[in-house]
Image (cartoon, helix red, strand yellow):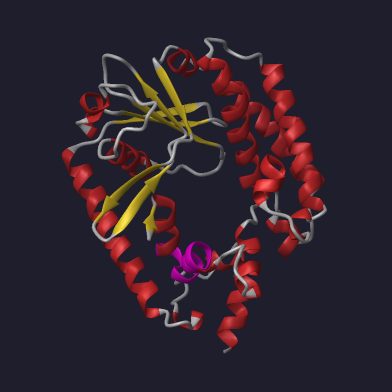
């Protein structure tokens, strides 16, 4: 089993949703229910779609330019983002993800499945335009921030790298948005956030990134002195950048934080393993959420309703 911060939170909110998403969903399974579960897993709200467009634009346009010592022009990044958003909207509105033979690897960045089309009354054009405006704000805030120079001046820039380490009876996986390596000081980890309403601290997520980075085996493109740079997770600089608010939060881990992270990983991971072992080929055995509001925006609510009838 692979554990991550997002999956542990999903499990805490609703063990059944976690199981359907992480264990049961399978696009290659012969069981049509498992295939349908995989398709439902791909659904995302318009708000999450906004964040996806920003993430891809950063990863595909801004970061490659910075690696070459260039700060890209805002209009070039926005053109890429809006072209991609239009193509994803076309893909999602036509529900091409349901077409026979369609797989995510074939569609690439165009793959898009909207929650509102599966469960709601369709896409609101006014809301879509608002999301596009917020995409522009997020990208503009990043390109005009001081952090863009911090990224540009790093000795190595590692984007969207999956980090995996063994922990007890399972694996820990994490994918920081950005890792900045320097030749003479500990690295910096940056995580982008694209939302306007929530005032949530992401120290656990960023702290887990630092913990895993300090314990993972070095990748081939990591610095030669990688172990010396990351041997103390407390010294890794952690930055949460809320792009819509143009707000940066810097975290530094304490020894107590490290203990709390390890406790959280062990406790939630152990409960997740127990849930897997207790399913016994009956999805109805998996407990559901204690928070009814979670069901309103759950990708699997129509499946769950059927399971509750049994």
| In the depicted structure, whether residue 132 falls above or below residue 185 | below
Q: Please state the horizontal and vertical placement of residue 62, each as a whole percent of the image.
A: 58, 22
Q: Is residue 207 left or right of residue 156?
A: left
Q: Main secondary structure of the magenta part?
A: helix
For the point 78% across and 48% down, the residue is 91
- Pick out the residue farthest to the left: 255
Q: Is residue 90 left or right of residue 276?
A: right
The residue segment tinted magenta is 12-23
Residue 307 is a magenta residue: no
The one of 43 and 48 positioned closer to us in this rendering: 43
Give the total number of marks visible in the rendering: 0
Q: Is residue 108 left or right of residue 293?
A: right
For the point 66% across and 32% down, the residue is 135
For the point 57% across and 12% down, the residue is 71
- Pick out the residue farthest to the bottom: 310
The one of 68 and 51 positioned closer to us in this rendering: 68
Location of the C terminus (image quadrant): bottom right
Residue 114's image quarter? bottom right
Q: Is residue 111 visible?
A: no
For the point 46% across and 42% down, the residue is 199
Q: Is residue 296 visible?
A: yes
| In the depicted structure, whether residue 40 falls above or below residue 241 | below
Q: Is residue 295 left or right of residue 280?
A: right
């Amino acid at each position: 089993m692979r554990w991550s911060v997002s999956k542990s939170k999903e499990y805490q909110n609703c063990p059944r949703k976690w199981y359907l998403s992480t264990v049961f969903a399978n696009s290659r399974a012969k069981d049509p229910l498992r295939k349908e579960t995989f398709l439902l897993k791909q659904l995302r709200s318009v708000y999450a779609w906004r964040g996806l467009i920003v993430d891809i634009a950063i990863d595909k346009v801004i970061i490659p330019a910075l690696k070459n010592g260039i700060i890209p022009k805002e209009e070039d990044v926005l053109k890429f983002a809006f072209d991609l958003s239009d193509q994803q909207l076309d893909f999602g509105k036509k529900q091409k993800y349901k077409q026979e033979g369609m797989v995510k690897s074939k569609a690439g960045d165009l793959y898009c499945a909207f929650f509102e089309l599966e469960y709601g009354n369709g896409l609101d054009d006014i809301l879509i335009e608002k999301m596009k405006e917020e995409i522009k704000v997020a990208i503009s805030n990043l390109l005009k921030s001081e952090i863009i120079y911090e990224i540009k001046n790093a000795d190595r820039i590692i984007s969207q790298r999956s980090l995996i380490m063994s922990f007890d009876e399972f694996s820990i996986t994490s994918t920081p948005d950005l890792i900045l390596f320097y030749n003479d000081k500990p690295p910096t980890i940056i995580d982008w956030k694209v939302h306007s309403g929530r005032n949530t601290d992401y120290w656990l997520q960023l702290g887990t990134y630092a913990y895993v980075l300090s314990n993972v085996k070095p990748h081939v493109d990591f610095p030669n002195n990688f172990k010396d740079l990351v041997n103390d997770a407390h010294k890794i600089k952690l930055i949460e950048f809320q792009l819509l608010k143009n707000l940066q939060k810097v975290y530094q881990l304490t020894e107590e934080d490290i203990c709390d992270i390890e406790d959280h990983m062990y406790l939630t991971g152990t409960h997740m393993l127990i849930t897997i072992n207790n399913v016994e080929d009956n999805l109805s055995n998996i407990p559901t959420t204690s928070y009814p509001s979670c069901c309103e925006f759950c990708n699997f609510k129509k499946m769950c309703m059927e399971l509750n009838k049994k």
